[in-house]
Image (spheres, helix red, strand yellow):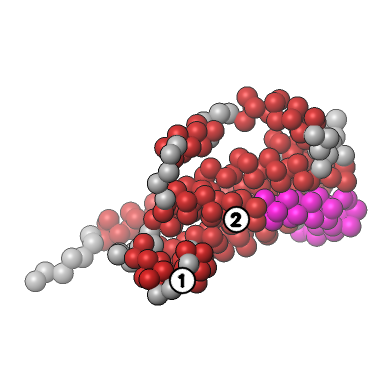
Amino acid sequence: MARNRSHPVATAGKYVALALYLAFALLPLYWLLKIAVTPDRLIFTDGVELWPSALTADNFRSVLFKTDFLAYFGNSLFVSLGTAAATTLIAAGAGYAFSRFTFAGKRIIIAVMLVTQMFPLLMIIAPIYRIVANFGMLNSLTSLIAVYTAFNIPFATFLMQSFFDGIPKDLEEAAMMDGCTRFQALRKVIFPLTLPGLGATLGFVFTAAWSELLFALMLISKNDAMTFPVGLLTFVSKFSVDWGQMMAAGVLALIPSCLFFVFIQRYLVQGLTSGAVKG
């Protein structure tokens, strides 16, 4: 039997396409790092050189010790973790309900959740601002957590529902036949199997909240409550932009996102393998 071998030209083409894709995807990140380590006097004189003629860590030192970067970083971390935890908890319950139960209005609720994802944010920022202002929650990190949670719940719910759908119902039915209540079956049998889904949802919501700018810009005006994306605007003045410090801050802000991306990758792979079991 002849072996199924790829033609050398086809193999080479795949590697070339992959290399071009990686270059396209990683070039902005590389340029971010390049400007961050370039002295201010060389940012424009080096032009489009792939590597600066001199390196410096002054931009990172200035960002860490001469600006409010750490405060912005802490605010974003608090908001992102709070949003991720609240959204994942609510989405897990809703996803389980949609996956396991049939009830009146189920299709309508799902349709409404889908419709909420179709509105451009610019259309609803004004009413959201009025609602938050009426509750006296402007310049509050809690208001950001509430708004981010509300907007991430629909997608997170559908994501969790897909994970629950991949777990055979026979498992919890067998547990209940052995004397477990539904809650005990959920806690002892279903919950461990959905850890990959919970991890993926947690990571997705965290990265979405970490990078959100529009609501943070509209609802927060006090410097001590600004999140990181809004704090980046402090590097822009009326007549100039401190590119070096802005790019250095951007590099530092990539660290949590990269860590959570690795976190998502791990749990997504586990989710695919566990979801392959059929009842």
| Residue 105 appears in the picture as rendered | yes
Q: Secondary structure at mark 1?
A: loop
Q: Is residue 96 magenta?
A: no
Q: Is residue 194 left or right of residue 150?
A: left
Q: Is residue 143 left or right of residue 182?
A: right
Which of the two discs, 2 and 1, labels the residue nearer the N terminus? Answer: 2
Q: Secondary structure at mark 2?
A: helix
Crowding at dot 1, Cα within 10 Å, few <14 / some 14-19 / many 20+, comes out as some
Q: Is residue 55 left or right of residue 67?
A: left
Q: Residue at x 30, y 64 (%)?
A: 278
| Residue 254 appears in the picture as rendered | no
Q: Residue furthest bottom?
A: 178
Q: On the image, which quarter does residue 59 sit in?
A: bottom right
Q: Which residues are magenta?
A: 54-83
Q: Main secondary structure of the magenta part?
A: helix
Question: Quarter holding the N terminus?
Answer: bottom left
Q: Is residue 49 left or right of residue 94?
A: right
Q: Residue at x 50, y 33 (%)?
A: 112
12 and 89: which is toward the camera: 89
Q: Which residue is mark 2?
A: 89
Crowding at dot 2, Cα within 10 Å, few <14 / some 14-19 / many 20+, comes out as some
Q: Which residue is mark 1?
A: 180
Please state the horizontal and vertical placement of residue 17, each as a whole percent of the image: 39, 51
Q: Residue at x 71, y 36 (%)?
A: 215
Three-letter code, disc 2: Leu
Q: Is residue 71 magenta?
A: yes
CA distance separating discs 2 and 1: 22 Å
Three-letter code, disc 1: Cys
74 and 12: which is toward the camera: 74
